[in-house]
Image (cartoon, grey):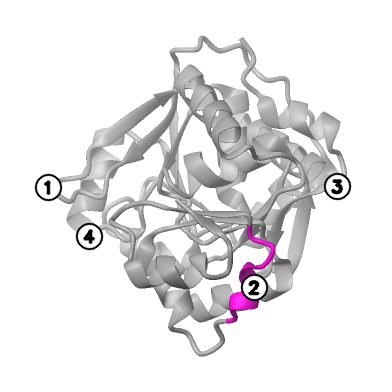
Amino acid sequence: MNYDWIKTRAAYDEVKPAVIDPFKGTSWSYQDLNKRAENLATHLQEAGVQQGDVVGIFAPNDVSLLDLLFATTKLGAVYLPINWRLKPKEIENVISDSNVKHIFYAAKHLSTLQGMADDLLYMDVDSAEYDEIVDPTNHKPFESVAIDGDTLAILMYTSGTTGLPKGVMFSYDSLINNLINTVLTYKINATYKTIIATPMFHVLGFNDLILPLLMAGGTAVLQRYFNGEDLNDLMTEHKPNYLILIPTMYYAMLVSKNFNIDNFKEVEFLVQGGSAPLAGVQQKIHGNGSSYY
């Protein structure tokens, strides 16, 4: 079966903004995302990456995480987002346990990986070389491979709260079913926009937030690293109609000097997870009429 859903979405919404990156000052349409992924898939195939190979990425919230996921989907390879907040011993365990073949990385975090994965470090996602490979204006079409639904699609590691991080395996069927159910639960559609402030190496920011939104045809605004004050500014500029954060992130927004409750006027609902809701946060937001789950 073909699980290349970004190519299907791109056929419906060729020019609509899919991802906005305020840090880089640019945006990408759905067609751009598909072309970038096909270019990267072509490059990886030429570099010897085959179906079932694990390809990792060690980077903050960035379009390159989507590039790699969609490229590995087209190849039938396995996508591995690595938590850059892990301790060196934990990162070493992830690298060893996952049998990762190549690791893309952001230069800012390169020092964390050096000495433990030098032979696996593949490319800086902020480099001119990477930009040239994925450049959608130089499209290299790629024919996606057929994949069985129980084939491994994504390998994510836990945060290691009670020991070393443990690998969580998502098959293509489980991933797609999760995305569809999330779209139906939140009633997301192509008019929706949100800010991706939770880390995209985590299931909350990736599987539960940005991927369902893109599957539904919405628009995602990336916050490279979370900061409450900066998120308030992004709220003012981009006016999202829903948010998914953890309670302490909502709190960081509320206590920042630039917090403006009017930013929540267009927010239809907010979702929190990871810990118990903070009563003061709920009271403040409910007072503006937004639903808080």
User: Which residue is drawn at the image coordinates 67% and 20% (left, top)?
Assistant: 144
- Magenta span has 72? no
User: Which residue is drawn at the image coordinates 56% and 87% (left, top)?
Assistant: 258
Q: Residue furthest left?
A: 163
The residue that label 1 is drawn on is 162
Q: Secondary structure at mark 4?
A: loop
User: Which residue is drawn at the image coordinates 27% and 58% (left, top)?
Assistant: 115
Which amino acid type is marked by label 3? Thr
Determine contact: label 4, label 1, CB under 8 Å: no
The residue that label 4 is drawn on is 87
Q: Residues within 10 Å of mark 3 (few under 14, many from 20)?
A: few
The mark that comes first in sequence, 4 or 3, is 4
Determine contact: label 2, label 1, CB under 8 Å: no
The residue that label 3 is drawn on is 137
The mark that comes first in sequence, 3 or 1, is 3
Q: Position of residue 150 (x, y in %)?
A: 44, 12
Q: Distance between the Cα atoms at labels 4 and 3?
A: 39 Å
Query: Where 24 falls versus 167 (above or below)?
Result: below
User: Which residue is drawn at the image coordinates 71% and 49% (left, top)?
Assistant: 192
Q: Distance between the Cα atoms at labels 3 and 2?
A: 36 Å
The residue that label 2 is drawn on is 263
Q: Secondary structure at mark 1?
A: loop
Q: Position of residue 88 (x, y in %)?
A: 22, 58
Looking at the image, which is closer to me, 138 or 46? 138
- Magenta span has 261? yes
Which amino acid type is marked by label 1? Thr
Which amino acid type is marked by label 4? Lys
Looking at the image, which is closer to me, 182 or 270? 270
The mark that comes first in sequence, 2 or 4, is 4
